[in-house]
Image (cartoon, helix red, strand yellow):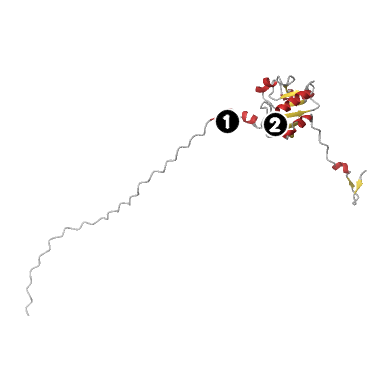
């Protein structure tokens, strides 16, 4: 029923303002298993990323297409695949991330041992297994240009100690201009005056 305000305008129904229902977290039993670590969740590409402290450890995916990559994604790297394979026989590369071997691996939801494998992954995370979990940002550092890597590897050049400025020679007072002295003519021998007698009275 549409309510009308005193002004006569139609007021929107109450259910318009009702909070939208939050989408359920896919494979929520994973978060329950990680509860002792206080995991945080953040949306990521239509999935739910799971963080423990500063590390992203898992991504929970349940999307209509492509359904084959639905399940639990493990934040790992290629160097750990061989060691994790015995723990997770159904683990494989993620097809939506491109062809070839991907660093991240998926525990497919379609596998018969999916829940068991997902809980095993949670047990490894609870135990602090270094094979699962990444600190975001490391990938950006690794993908830096070779020139930037080379510059980062070089120790900073030592600055040459600044030499104290050379002391300026004490300024000599300007030479006094010699006054041009006119040469006086050599004095002639004083003319001898004849002795004069006293005036007679």
Q: Earlier in the sequence, mark 2 or mark 1?
A: 2
Residue under label 2: 56
Give the total of numbered labels. 2
**The N terminus lies in which quarter of the figure?**
top right
Q: Secondary structure at mark 1?
A: helix
Q: What percent of the width, then of the height, locates residue 65?
A: 80, 25
Q: Is residue 87 above or below residue 149?
A: above
Whether residue 143 is visible: no
Q: Within 10 Å of the Cα at label 1, are there few (<14), some (14-19), or many (20+) other Cα atoms?
A: few
Q: Position of residue 167 (x, y in %)?
A: 38, 45
Check disc 1 and report the residue beneath it: 148
Which quadrant would residue 80 be assigned to in this image?
A: top right
Q: Is residue 15 visible?
A: yes
Residue 161 figure quarter: top left
Q: Nearer the viewer, residue 103 or 82?
A: 82
Q: Position of residue 49 (x, y in %)?
A: 73, 31
Quarter placement of the C terminus? bottom left
Seen as rendered, the residue at the extreme bottom is 201
Residue 147 x/y as whole percent: 57, 29
Label 2 SS: strand
- Against 57, residue 175 (above or below) is below
Cβ–Cβ below 8 Å for labels 2 and 1?
A: no
What is the quadrant of residue 16 in the picture?
top right
Quick check: 187 left or right of 170?
left
In the depicted view, which residue is nearer to us: 125 or 23?
Answer: 125
At 75% from the left edge and 26% from the top edge, which residue is drawn? 119
Which residue is at the front of the view, 133 or 117? Answer: 117
């Amino acid at each position: 029923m549409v309510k009308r305000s005193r002004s006569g305008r139609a007021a929107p129904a109450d259910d318009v303002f009702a909070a939208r229902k939050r989408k359920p977290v896919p494979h929520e039993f994973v978060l329950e298993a990680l509860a002792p670590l206080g995991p945080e969740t953040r949306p990521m590409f239509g999935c739910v990323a799971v963080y423990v402290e500063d590390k992203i450890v898992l991504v929970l995916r349940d999307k209509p297409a492509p359904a084959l990559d639905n399940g639990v994604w493990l934040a790992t790297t290629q160097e750990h695949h061989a060691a994790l394979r015995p723990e997770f026989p159904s683990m494989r590369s993620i097809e939506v991330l491109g062809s070839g071997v991907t660093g991240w691996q998926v525990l497919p939801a379609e596998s018969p041992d999916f829940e068991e494998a997902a809980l095993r992954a949670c047990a490894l995370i609870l135990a602090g297994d270094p094979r699962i979990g990444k600190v975001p940002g490391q990938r950006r550092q690794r993908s830096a240009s070779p020139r930037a890597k080379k510059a980062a590897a070089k120790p900073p050049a030592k600055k040459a100690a600044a030499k104290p400025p050379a002391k300026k020679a004490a300024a000599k007072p300007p030479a006094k201009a010699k006054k041009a002295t006119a040469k006086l003519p050599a004095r002639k021998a004083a003319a001898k005056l004849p002795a004069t007698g006293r005036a007679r009275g």
